[in-house]
Amino acid sequence: MERVKIEDPEIDIALTSFKKVKVVGEVKWGKITMEDVKAVERKLEAFDAERLLIVQDKRDLRSKILKIIEPADLLR
């Protein structure tokens, strides 16, 4: 996969394969609320790709369209 920059909307992570967006994501650090999760859902819902939200602590956070992960998940 290749990293690309998407500026509208501005997103933290965008990976492509064969010129097709495969993964988009946002990184949010600190205290994250469900309202923050909903804002990221709205931002990424237009992309036909895997949608990631990377947070410091994913406890109590849920989403139907985002895969919510924390640093420990990346090490597994």
Image (cartoon, rainbow, N blue to C red):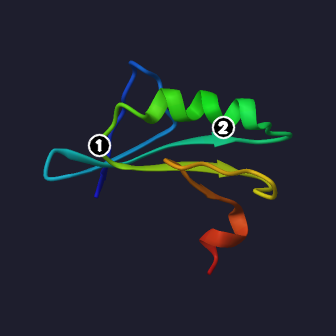
* Total labels drawn: 2
- Classify the position of the C terminus by image quarter: bottom right
Quarter holding residue 9: top left
Viewer-proximal residue, 47 or 3?
A: 47
Q: Mark 2: which amino acid? A: Val
Residue drawn at (74%, 50%) of the image: 61
Whether residue 32 is situated above or below residue 68 in the rendered picture: above
- Is residue 69 shown above or below 15? below
Q: Residue furthest bottom?
A: 76
Residue at the spot x=63%, y=51% of the render?
54
Q: Secondary structure at mark 2?
A: helix
Q: Is residue 3 above or below residue 6?
A: below
The percent position of residue 20, horizontal first and vertical second, equals 19, 46
Horizontal side of residue 16 vs 3, given as left or right: left
- Residue 55 x, y percent position in the rendering: 71, 50
Kindly identify which numbered label has been placed on residue 37: 2
Q: Which residue is mark 1?
A: 48
The furthest residue to the front: 64
Residue type at tag 1: Asp
Near-viewer residue (20 or 44): 44
Q: What whole-number distance in Å separates the C-alpha atoms at marks 1 and 2?
A: 18 Å
For residue 27, what is the image quadrant? Answer: top right
